[in-house]
Structure formats: structure tokens, C-alpha cells
């Protein structure tokens, strides 16, 4: 997940829908045993001690595949390089649902003092780096492994098919490689299994352990990278009229592009951000260079606005440069789309979330300017993605080390909640579909 802050808001409305695994009209959630909870904790700690970077999750994939095979699931490996998929076919007819967890770690040197601290190293961009599950993907995998074990034990009563997706490279494929959810879909994952809905969980330091943040509609922003090369003509700093100054042109481009969000798109639909992160040009105080390089990011919550921002960024940069006699070459690298929770699906499954976590621990989430490639799955079929708090009780989530921090810490009590949420989503979706 691309790093961003998140705030847990206040739940304003609730639905009274309810369903359960039995045919009785009860609001009891399916729970996991203490024994299975301990297994989930052990899996999490093992995965945490052996983190692997994007598209390099070789050991991780073997551990997951072996577990799914032991449960008797149909197992596929090597999807999008290292992805693993397990398929559980219930004894009763029903819909197909997909449950997703991501697998990759980050190039971060762990600074926590937990006994299962990562000391792993790997190569990233040609350099040796420490590797850490600093975004909680180890918890995601462990929770989904636990859900697979629980649901497999319930196979005789399961209605429909459950697809367990263990996805690599959520943090982005290295270099020019493809990867992640987009590549899994490109290789035919949903064409083969055709789920009616897909569910995902992300643990988050900005929430107290066991609390769940959800939101109908857009939840997380799209994330796109752009670069602009401004071409001028080099000249002596004392004679600017002897050339074309790309620094002045670049400065005006930076300024003018800020009017895209503030003046050129309808921000009543959704907020957006255009930010520059790199400005490079020049080698000496008295030489006007012939080129300046700019790079930045675009974050947005509306797919139509996203397309408009792309178009207007290109036009604004090119026309601004032209007005100074320079040229601007714009490249936009499309990243992750907006993560959108299907409104009907969210409303249908909200009672399930509340039964698992408790009414007082379920909150409407603020918009998150970070991005997630779960978004690709949710563009194909209705999706529901929520945040699970992992900061211990009594600690202020606002000041807790954030995801991607070397001090990122997760209270393992959250694992039970997350595992049970996966289980109950699968069970309740089938029951509600039959109504």
C-alpha cells in the first residue's frame, strides 16, 4: 500500500440485515477456536521473520501453497510470478466469492524489538537493503490462511465456492516488471473463477486493535506518477536573452498546474491532489541549463476527474512552456485506480462486520489518499475493502508508528477479528444470495 494517513470516523447509520451460517434467524457470527488463533499467530510470526520483496515471494508462496494443499483445496501457483490461489468447493450449490490477501514486504530495516524481528536482507534497485513486513501483509496472509482452514472444516455446509487469493507485488513490481492484481487479472484469474464479489482487509496503525473502518463508494485514491521534461536552450546567466530558460518555464508549470484542481475540475465530486516531488536542473549558478526535469504524483477519488487531470496536466505544461519559448514533454504513468467499495455490497455485508467486531468498534472511515491495487479486482466485480485497527488499547493511534515505518507494530489480537471477518463474509454472502 502506498503510504498515507488515515482517520477512523464515526459510524452514522446501520442496517438491520442479519444472517448466519445456520438456517436459523440468528445474529451469531462464526468464530474460530483458540487453537486456530494460535496457529494464525504462529504463521504470522514465521512470515514476518521471512519477508520477501515484490515478485520475489518464493518462500512465502511455498508456505502458503503447502498449507492450502494440506487442507485439500485446489491449488494454483505461479500466478503473476509468485501468486497462489486456493479453491474450496462447498458441498452445496451457491455463489463464488473471492477473499484476497497480499504477500510482499518492503525495503525497510526493522527497528522493533519483537522476538520474531526480521533480519532479512535483499537487493532493491541494485542495493542491499533490509526487508520488513512494515505494512502488515504478513497479518493479511496469516488471517486468510486461518480462514481457509476454518472454512475447509465447514465444507459440508458451505454453499458455493470460495477462492482464496494470495497476491504478490501489491507494493508495486520492481523495475519494468509487471505484477500484482493487474497481472493476476491479465492472466485470467477472474475469467477462470468468475467470483460474484471480492473482499479484502488491510491492517492499519491509525485504528485501535479490533476496530474496523469501512466506507461506501470511493475509499482510497488512485495513484499516478507523472514526469515533465522541460527543454530550453543553454546560455550564460548574464545573458538570458541568448537562450531559452527552462527553469523559469518549469517554475511557471509548477504554479500553473495547481489551478487544475482548484479551477479546472469539479472538486465537489471528490478531492484531488497534484504534487511535485522532484525538481532537477542546472549545474552552476551562472549557467542557464538547457533542461529541467520535474516529477510528481496525482491522487484522486473520481475516475472521470482522473482522466480530466491527465489531459489538463499535459495541456497546461505544454502551453506554459510554449509561452516562454521552451518545450515540455509530459509522460503519465498510470498506477492504481480509485479503490471503490460497491455500495450495495457494503450495505449488505455491514451487519456481518458489526457482528464480528461489535457495533461499537465499526466506524465510517475517512477518505484515504493512499492507494491499493485491490482496486483492480473491485473494478471487475463488486468489492468490499476495510481497515482493521492493530494499535494496542491505551495507545493513541494518531501517534503510533504508521504503516511503512521501521517501528510499525501490530497487536496480534487483531488476527482473530480479521480471520473471523473473512470467514463470515464468505458464509453470509452465500446465505444472503439465497434469500
Image: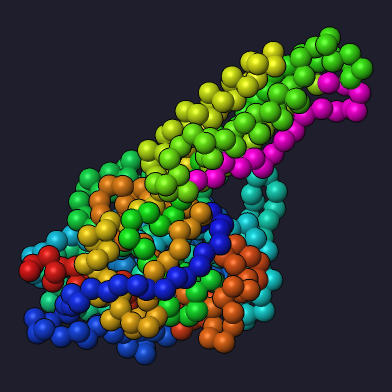
x and y, in percent, of residue 151 in the image: 24, 75
The image quadrant where one finds the C terminus is bottom left
- Identify which residue, 376 or 83, lies in the foreground: 376
Magenta residues, dominant SS class: strand
Q: Report which quarter residue 348 is drawn in.
A: bottom left
Residue appearing at x 43%, y 78% in the figure: 211
Residue appearing at x 25%, y 51% in the figure: 381
Residue appearing at x 65%, y 29% in the figure: 253
Residue 105 covered by magenta stretch = no
Judge whether residue 59 can be spotted in this image: yes
- Identify which residue, 394 or 132, lies in the foreground: 394
x and y, in percent, of residue 126 in the image: 68, 44
x and y, in percent, of residue 386 in the image: 38, 66
Residue appearing at x 45%, y 59% in the figure: 367
x and y, in percent, of residue 262 in the image: 54, 40
Where are the magenta residues, as a range? 272-288
In the figure, is residue 128 to the left or right of 18?
Answer: right
- Identify which residue, 222 or 365, lies in the foreground: 365
Going by the picture, which residue comes out furthest to the bottom? 34
Amino acid at each position: 500500500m502506498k503510504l498515507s494517513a488515515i482517520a477512523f470516523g464515526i459510524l452514522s447509520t446501520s442496517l438491520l440485515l442479519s444472517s448466519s451460517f445456520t438456517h436459523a434467524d440468528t445474529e451469531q457470527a462464526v468464530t474460530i477456536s483458540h487453537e486456530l488463533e494460535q496457529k494464525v499467530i504462529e504463521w504470522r510470526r514465521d512470515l514476518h521473520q521471512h519477508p520477501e520483496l515484490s515478485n520475489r515471494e518464493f518462500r512465502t508462496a511455498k508456505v502458503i501453497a503447502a498449507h492450502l494443499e494440506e487442507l485439500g483445496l485446489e491449488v494454483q501457483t505461479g500466478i503473476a510470478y509468485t501468486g497462489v490461489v486456493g479453491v474450496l468447493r462447498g458441498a452445496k450449490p451457491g455463489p463464488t466469492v473471492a477473499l484476497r490477501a497480499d504477500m510482499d514486504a518492503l525495503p525497510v530495516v526493522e527497528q522493533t524489538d519483537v522476538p520474531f524481528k526480521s533480519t532479512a536482507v535483499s537487493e532493491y534497485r541494485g542495493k542491499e537493503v533490509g526487508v520488513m513486513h512494515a505494512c502488515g501483509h504478513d497479518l493479511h496472509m496469516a488471517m486468510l490462511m486461518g480462514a481457509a482452514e476454518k472454512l475447509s472444516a465447514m465444507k459440508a455446509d458451505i454453499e458455493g465456492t470460495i477462492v482464496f487469493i494470495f497476491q504478490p507485488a501489491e507494493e508495486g513490481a520492481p523495475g519494468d516488471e509487471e505484477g500484482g492484481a493487474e497481472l493476476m487479472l491479465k492472466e485470467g484469474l477472474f475469467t477462470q473463477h468468475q467470483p460474484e464479489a471480492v473482499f479484502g482487509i488491510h491492517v492499519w496503525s491509525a485504528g485501535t486493535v479490533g476496530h474496523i473502518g469501512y466506507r461506501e463508494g470511493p475509499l482510497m485514491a488512485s495513484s499516478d506518477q507523472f514526469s515533465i521534461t522541460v527543454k530550453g536552450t543553454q546560455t550564460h546567466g548574464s545573458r538570458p536573452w541568448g537562450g531559452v530558460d527552462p527553469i523559469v518555464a518549469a517554475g511557471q508549470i509548477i504554479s500553473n498546474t495547481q489551478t487544475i484542481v482548484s479551477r479546472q475540475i469539479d472538486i465537489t465530486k471528490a478531492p484531488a491532489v497534484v504534487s511535485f516531488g522532484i525538481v532537477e536542473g542546472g549545474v552552476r549558478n551562472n549557467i542557464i541549463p538547457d533542461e529541467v526535469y520535474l516529477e510528481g504524483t496525482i491522487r484522486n477519488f473520481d475516475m472521470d476527474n482522473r482522466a480530466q487531470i491527465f489531459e489538463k496536466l499535459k495541456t497546461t505544461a505544454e502551453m506554459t512552456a510554449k509561452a516562454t519559448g521552451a518545450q515540455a514533454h509530459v509522460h503519465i504513468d498510470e498506477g492504481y485506480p480509485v479503490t471503490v467499495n460497491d455500495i450495495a455490497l457494503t450495505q449488505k455485508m455491514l451487519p456481518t462486520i458489526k457482528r464480528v467486531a461489535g457495533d461499537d468498534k465499526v466506524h465510517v472511515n475517512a477518505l484515504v489518499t493512499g492507494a491499493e491495487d485491490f482496486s483492480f479486482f473491485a473494478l471487475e466485480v463488486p468489492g468490499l475493502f476495510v481497515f482493521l485497527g492493530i494499535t494496542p488499547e491505551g495507545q493513541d493511534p494518531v501517534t503510533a508508528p504508521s504503516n511503512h515505518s521501521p517501528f510499525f507494530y501490530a497487536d496480534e489480537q487483531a488476527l482473530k477479528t480479521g480471520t473471523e471477518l473473512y470467514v463470515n463474509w464468505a458464509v453470509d454472502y452465500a446465505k444472503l444470495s439465497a434469500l
